[in-house]
Structures are given as structure tokens and as C-alpha cells.
Image (cartoon, grey):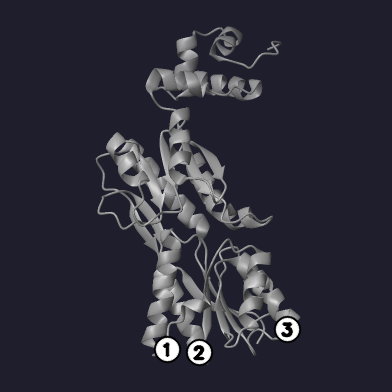
Amino acid sequence: MTEKRRPNLRMLADELRLSVTTVSRALKDGPEVHPDTISRVKAAAEAAGYVPNLHGRALRTGSTRNLTAILPMETRDYLSDILKLPLMEGMTMAARQLGYTLTIFSTTPEESPQENLEQVLRSGGADGIVITRMLAADPRIPYLLERGIPFIAFGRSDLDWDYAYVDVDNERIAYEATSLLIECGRRRIALQLLTREDQYSAMRLAGYRKAIEDHALTFDPELIGQEDFTMEASERWIERLLDGASPPSGLVCANELGLLGALSALRKRGLMPGHDFSIATRDNTRIARYLSAPLVAHSVDMVTVGRALVEGLVLQIEHPDNPLTQQVFAGEISVVGDE
């Protein structure tokens, strides 16, 4: 094939001296096409670098075989996207295995989730959507349900609507992490949260508060931090708390970036993690396991979570009458690092 243009069905058909219909059916493993012909067509398509025209197929069938995941960055930090890589890996692998492509629509933390969603829908390039960073009364849920658009949420809202979701039990994880620090003898424990409005933070706060109350301690709102916890922001916040009149002796981190900032603040003041100050951290990237510090690590297999999101979305697209996916991952708590 000598043409420099992108190869198409007509070019493959001409080269193989077959009809366009036969080539098209062979690429779809049509039962009416002889297996030898299917093998010959697929070999020629691969050699030519043939890629199906998704826009043309969408016009013909109403399907793009593409999914879009809207993933806002957690913080404006050089390492912020690393925290989402396992989730993206799981979604990408599942989409490929199910015969779909996956588009990641990345946004900044301050952008409107509703406007981001509407922008994706205007493009018309997805059969289904993954939404994240859920709000207590998330307007995207009724918006999508009323329009009959397949979607799955990473997280839950407080709305009384039946919709597909995959979530992490953040309340239980925060409860267990806080309880472990208390059992280590820590009585004043700080908590890092991210966006004030999202359910991830609300559930973590609920779990933390319940642990404080169950251990007959006093809840102190001055120990709760809510901001974009980059490494620098975490370091500054912990330094302010340590310099206060009644400093904390423990911390439940928002994420791995918060952990690194907190460790830097402790090092500057000559405080030893595990001895002078105890830390519990989210560790979905497994970073904590490579730090020379004793830590309480709570982790979730985010690759598996990503797979579950895409599998649940595709199930909804291809079998709309089946029960919706509604799955919650418990996560694990462990102690890591040198004693």
C-alpha cells in the first residue's frame, strides 16, 4: 500500500481485492466471513496501521466505544497527578479489555464540576462518563439521570437517587486510623482535609470525630485543616500547629503530599516520627513503605477501584436493565516503617 493517507476500508478492500462490506465484516469477526479471510483482512489492517473511524461509526450506530473520566487534580502541586495514576491505570486496562477507549478529562481544583460535565457532554464523544469529587447534594446526579446518560460516580452523595457508584469507605478508614493513634497514647490529633464541600472530606471528618468521641476525648476544631494540601501547605500548617499553645502529638494526613510536608516540619523541629509525634496517612501509592519512619498507613488498591468503575459503567451501557453497580471498598490499615 503506497498511499500516504490514513488507511481506510476502501484502501484495504482494493489491496485485498475484496468488497468493502466483506472487509468491514471481517474486522468485526462476522460469522458469514470465512476464517481464512478474517485472518487475511486483520493481518493487512495491522500492517497498514488501520484504525476505525470513531466519528463515522458514531454517526452510523450512535456509539463511539469511548468513555470519559472527569478527574480534577487534587492540588496544584508537581506531584498531585501521581496520586491518581493507579486509578487511571485500572480504568485504562479495563476499558481496553472491554473494547473501549478511555479519555481522561483533567481539570483544576477550582473549576466547576457541573461546567466540566457540560463541556464533556457538548463534545458528544463518549458513550458513558465517570464523575469524581462528589458533593453532598451533587447536582450532576439528577442532571445525568434526567437525560438518560450512562454514568458512574467515584464516591457517594446524600441524594436519595438510585445511581451507579464505586466508593472507598473513607469514614471507616479515618475512624480506624485515628483510633490507632489514640491507642498509641496520642491525645491531640490533627486532621488534614481537602476540598471543604466534597464527600470524601465529609466522611473522613465524620470517622475522625467518632473516634475522638468514642475514646472520650474532646473534639477541637482548631486541629482540623482544610485547604489544598501540597507539600508546602502541609509543612506550613503543621509548623503553625506545633508552634501553638497546645500543639498536637499526632496527625491523620489528607494524602501522601501532606505526609511529606508534615515530615519536613517535624524534621525542622527535631521531632522524631513514632517517638515524639505519630502520623497516619493515606498511602495508595505505597510511598510510605519506603520512608524510614514508623507510620500508620491506610491504603486501597486503586487499580482495582479503577477497574470496577469502568466495568460498572460498561455494564450499564451494554445491559441497561441489569442492577446498577454499587460497590464500596473497605481499604486496609497497617503499620509501616522502622520502629
Residue 129 to residue 334: above or below: above
Instruction: Kindly identify which numbered label has been placed on residue 217.
Output: 1
Q: Is the C-beta separation of discs 3 and 2 under 8 Å?
A: no
Q: Secondary structure at mark 3?
A: loop
Neighbours of disc 1 within 10 Å: few (<14), some (14-19), many (20+): few
* Left or right: 214 in relation to 339: left
Neighbours of disc 3 within 10 Å: few (<14), some (14-19), many (20+): few
Question: What's the residue type where badge 3 is placed?
Answer: Arg
* Residue at the (44%, 62%) spot, across then down: 200
Q: Is residue 174 visible in the rendered structure shown here?
A: yes
Badge 3 is on which residue? 269
Badge 2 is on which residue? 187
Q: Secondary structure at mark 2?
A: loop
Q: Position of residue 338 (x, y in %)?
A: 67, 83
Residue 14 to residue 134: above or below: above
Question: What's the residue type where badge 1 is placed?
Answer: Leu
Q: Report, in whole angstroms, how far the alpha carbon at label 3 lies from the one at label 1.
A: 27 Å
Q: Position of residue 112 (x, y in %)?
A: 48, 45
* Left or right: 176 in relation to 338: left
Q: Earlier in the sequence, mark 3 or mark 1?
A: 1
Q: Report, in whole angstroms, how far the alpha carbon at label 3 lies from the one at label 2.
A: 20 Å
